[in-house]
């Protein structure tokens, strides 16, 4: 998998790993990089089958596979403990990672995520699936901002969105990859497993998110042993882009509050004993 490492290079500095949503590419986090690199070692990556991480994801692909792929990358980079910040699908990867490799997580931030797919989110995904299958890639990409950004932001950034549309069409991850990744996301159900997550988790939502209703983050935080919910009033599903100043402030406060915390007991589990997947 393609990755980049930015920021401070010191054993005394915490590592923050950024995991994107359904698009899968690291460029989503551009508004956060300068702030994070000032304080942390930052790892970005393109998820398997997206961006520069070429290849076809297999049939039967699951969220657990995405978690294993990220764990393998962290093992390759010799990262034994880190903060994970994940947007939507990236946050679900983080939750699966917390369950499968608990010693890895110092903390987790799930941005506009969920434990089980909500009917509104399913409706939006099905609309996007139908667009892709019946109208093609350009129609799918052209409609995508409607699910990500508030209407006033869309209106004010028309030229930027047109540039992004052309780029995304040219670098589309492929219909088969997207549909398999989307199926993995839609079928993931963590409702019976969240009580086993021992890492501190921030469920961060936006009140005006069209794609993922904000109450999903509330329910997620309440089901976690060490969950906390915070909400932004504006920004839509991609509020890390539309209101990066507020988002970055919340994120930095969380990460600094959970930096170098004493490691919780993992019974006999420690990073050297984890059955790391091959990367």
Image (cartoon, helix red, strand yellow):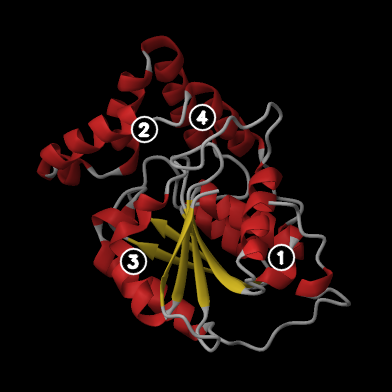
Depth check, mark 3 against mark 1: the one in front is 3
Instruction: Identify the residue shown where x is 81% and y is 76%.
Output: 266
Binning the other alpha carbons within 10 Å of mark 2 as few (below 14), some (14 to 19) or many (20 upward) gives few
Image disc number at residue 197: 1
Name which of mark 2 and mark 3 comes first in the sequence: 3
Residue ID for mark 3:
33
Depth check, mark 2 against mark 3: the one in front is 2
Q: Are marks 3 and 1 in contact (CB under 8 Å)?
A: no
Name which of mark 2 and mark 4 comes first in the sequence: 2
Could you say whether the residue bearing mark 2 is in a helix, strand or loop? loop
Q: Are marks 2 and 4 in contact (CB under 8 Å)?
A: no
Give x and y (percent) for residue 221.
58, 63
Q: Are marks 4 and 3 in contact (CB under 8 Å)?
A: no
Q: CA distance from mark 3 to mark 1?
A: 27 Å
Could you say whether the residue bearing mark 3 is in a helix, strand or loop? helix
Q: CA distance from mark 1 to mark 4?
A: 28 Å
Residue ID for mark 4:
178
Depth check, mark 1 against mark 4: the one in front is 4
Q: CA distance from mark 2 to mark 1?
A: 36 Å
Asked whether residue 259 is in view, the answer is yes
Depth check, mark 2 against mark 4: the one in front is 2
Residue ID for mark 2:
171
Give x and y (percent) for residue 277.
75, 53
- Place residue 34 in its image quadrant: bottom left
Give x and y (percent) for residue 216.
52, 51
Q: Are marks 2 and 3 in contact (CB under 8 Å)?
A: no
């Amino acid at each position: 998998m393609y990755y980049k490492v930015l920021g401070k290079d010191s054993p005394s500095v915490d590592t923050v790993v950024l995991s994107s949503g359904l698009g899968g590419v690291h460029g989503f986090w551009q508004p956060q990089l300068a702030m994070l690199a000032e304080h942390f070692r930052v790892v970005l990556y393109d998820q398997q089958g997206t961006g520069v991480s070429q290849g076809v994801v297999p049939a039967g692909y699951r969220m657990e596979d995405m978690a294993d792929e990220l764990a393998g990358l962290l093992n390759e980079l010799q990262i034994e403990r880190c903060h994970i910040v994940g947007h939507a699908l990236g946050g679900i990867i983080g939750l699966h990672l917390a369950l499968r490799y608990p010693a890895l997580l110092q903390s987790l931030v799930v941005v506009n995520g969920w434990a089980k797919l909500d009917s509104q989110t399913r409706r939006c995904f099905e609309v996007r699936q139908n667009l892709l299958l019946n109208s093609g890639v350009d129609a799918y990409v052209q409609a995508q901002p409607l699910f990500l950004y508030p209407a006033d932001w869309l209106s004010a950034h028309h030229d930027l969105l047109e540039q992004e549309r052309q780029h995304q069409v040219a670098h589309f991850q492929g219909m088969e990859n997207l549909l398999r990744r989307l199926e993995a996301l839609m079928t993931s159900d963590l409702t019976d497993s969240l009580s086993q997550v021992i890492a501190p988790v921030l469920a961060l939502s936006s009140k005006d998110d069209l794609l993922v209703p904000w109450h999903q983050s509330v329910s997620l935080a309440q089901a976690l042993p060490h969950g906390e919910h915070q909400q932004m009033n504006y920004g839509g599903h991609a509020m890390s882009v539309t209101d990066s100043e507020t988002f970055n402030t919340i994120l930095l406060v969380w990460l600094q509050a959970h930096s170098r915390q004493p490691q919780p007991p993992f019974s006999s589990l420690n990073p050297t004993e984890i059955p790391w997947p091959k990367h």
